[in-house]
Amino acid sequence: MDLNSPRLEWRRKLPSSTTLSDENVVKIRHWIDVCLDTHHECFNAETASSWVPSRLLEIDHEDNGLKIRLIESSDHDLQAGAKFAALSHVWGNQTESPPLCLLSSNLYQFKNGIDESELPKNFVDAAHVCVHLGLRYLWIDSLCIIQDSLVDWREQAVLMHLVYRYALVTLVATSATFCNQGFLERSIDSIPAIKIAYSLPITGEQPLSAAHYMIIYDYDNAQDSYRMFAVNGSKWNTRAWTMQERSLSTRMVHFCQNKIFFECRSCLQSEENEPTQESDTINSTLWPRGASVSFDELYEHWQLFVCEYSSRNLTVSTDKLPAIQSVAEEMAAVTGREYIRFAGMWKANLQDELLWCVSFGTLGSPAPELFSDF
Ligand SMILES: [Zn+2]
């Protein structure tokens, strides 16, 4: 092995049993710090706002486990500018694996505390990430929006784009296909690598212990040659809701099966520090920002966005418009143009928008019959 190889920096230790290893926690903290300190695209006057969501989960880690409770900004429990993380995840089949939900009936109970044993594994994993990153607050959609209150749902839906904008980081449960799966455990056996013990004959010194080893990966396999496959090819990336969550986030950590990625508005990084080759990914997946962006420019992105969004999957068909509303809210806020919520169209371009059609061979699930509740 050529120890002077530029690939040397790609070597890493034997994979740990969790993607939240000490080594990775240091990396995530470093990525966030660099982003905050040096990325003008990511951290500016807009993202320096003291805005906080109406509700957040407060997390304390004690000797006997996590202590979690729901807090509301209206109760003055929450200080302006409090740093928080947001979770982006796939709920999964809600009959087989229903996520824990905030309801009108358990609001008071959740404010007193939520037992860790009641939480889906993805939520517990997200809370542990927060503890390791030193973040006290976490936003999870099903626990921070009252799921059986249409009034609350409407109020919170128009604020959702701000959640992802102002979250210090969006934690993406990329590897999990349902809420009880968890997203931190690695499947070490599936990593394409071999372990070789070795020693080096160094004059005058004892050979190094056989406990030293190198890990050799097959970097040429199809999956690894496409660095972001674990993200872009995931089930998470096929869901309608997650498209706007990714587009609107300022910075994300993707917890994939065997690797973590950091994605912000200025860079892509991976756990193994290999060069990221998808520089175009940032422009194609993240929603453009800035007060100087024109409506016409954003409308071009909107049309492309809607094309991909239309092919994505929804569990609840009536979410077709709500799951894209946050992007529209952000676009309306920047341009001042009117978005027709019940139609999913822009008033200024209504004539063109009514000429939509279905691409040949891409007919998916039918549109819901009625959006009367929206
Ligand atoms: Zn950044």
Image (cartoon, grey):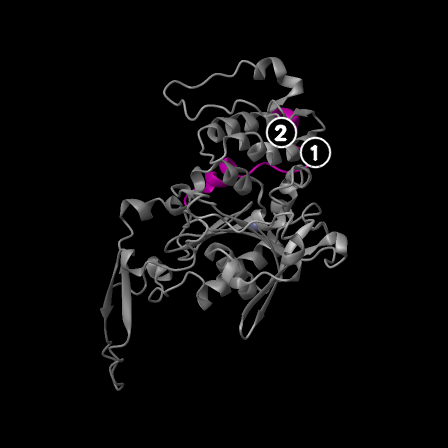
Q: In the rendered image, which quarter is residue 370 located in?
A: top right
The residue to which callout 2 is attached is 373
Up the image or down, 327 lies above or below 188; here it is above
Q: Is residue 150 left or right of residue 364?
A: right
Residues 319 and 136: in front is 319
| Mark 2 vs ligand 1: CB below 8 Å | no
Q: Secondary structure at mark 1?
A: helix
Up the image or down, 293 lies above or below 180; here it is above
Evaluate whether residue 70 shows in this view: no
| Mark 1 vs ligand 1: CB below 8 Å | no
Check the picture and name the quadrant holding the N terminus.
bottom left
For the record, the magenta segment spans 277-296
Q: Which mark is residue 333?
A: 1
Residues 341 and 13: in front is 341
Residues 299 and 200: in front is 299
Check the picture and name the quadrant holding the C terminus.
top right
Picture coordinates of residue 359, whole percent (x, y): 42, 19
Residue at image position (47%, 36%) is: 315
Residue at image position (45%, 23%) is: 366
Q: Secondary structure at mark 2?
A: loop
Picture coordinates of residue 67, whole percent (x, y): 59, 66
Residues 374 and 259: in front is 374
Q: Earlier in the sequence, mark 2 or mark 1?
A: 1
Q: Which mark is residue 239?
A: none
Q: Is residue 286 magenta?
A: yes
Up the image or down, 63 lies above or below 10; here it is below
Q: Is residue 179 left or right of residue 35?
A: left
